[in-house]
Amino acid sequence: MITSPHQKYQQTQLHTAPPAQLLLMLYDGAIRFVRMGVSGIEERDLEKANTNLCKAQAVIHELIAALNFDYPIAKTLSQVYEYMIHQLINANLKKNKKPAYEVLSYLLDLREAWDTANKSLNANPEQVE
């Protein structure tokens, strides 16, 4: 149950955002959770590391679920996402930051690419067919 005004705002934002914005929100969440998971590893807070690395995996699973396999790139993205999940599992099991940082770099690059594509489409809406 939503109780705070901030939670109501977030819920409204989620339900009214266009698909491209929802995708960026997923990337932002995954990035935030990976960073918090790394922080947990650095602080030797195993619960924090586990919780946040698992949340990052869940967000990446949502990214996989959002793929449209009518486009050839979806298969490649699916494989990249699966690799990221594998690396997050390794980071979590071994409490090793290196695989998590690798995933973080991929997420940041992909987020930037989607953001650029979204801005390009918004600047030239006649190109969308």
Image (spheres, helix red, strand yellow):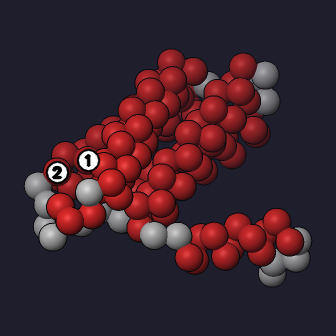
Q: Which mark is residue 73?
A: 2
Q: Where is residue 46 in the image (x, y as percent from the top left)?
A: 74, 33
Residue count near mark 1 (Cα–Cα under 10 Å), binned few <14, some 14–19, many ≥20: some
Q: Relative to residue 7, is residue 30 drawn left or right?
A: left
Residue shown at the point (41%, 38%) measured from the top left: 112
Q: Where is residue 24 in the image (x, y as percent from the top left)?
A: 48, 52
Circles 1 and 2: CB distance less than 8 Å?
A: yes
Q: Where is residue 99 in the image (x, y as percent from the top left)?
A: 47, 24
Looking at the rendered image, the quarter that the N terminus falls into is bottom right
Q: Relative to residue 107, is residue 120 drawn left or right?
A: left
Residue type beneath disc 1 = Leu
- Image height check: is 54 above or below 3? above
Residue count near mark 2 (Cα–Cα under 10 Å), binned few <14, some 14–19, many ≥20: few
Secondary element at tag 2:
helix
Residue type beneath disc 2 = Ile
Report the Cα–Cα distance between label 1 and label 2: 6 Å
Residue shown at the point (19%, 46%) measured from the top left: 76
Residue shown at the point (52%, 70%) measured from the top left: 17
Q: Which mark is residue 77?
A: 1
Secondary element at tag 1:
helix
Residue 78 visible somewhere in the drawing: yes
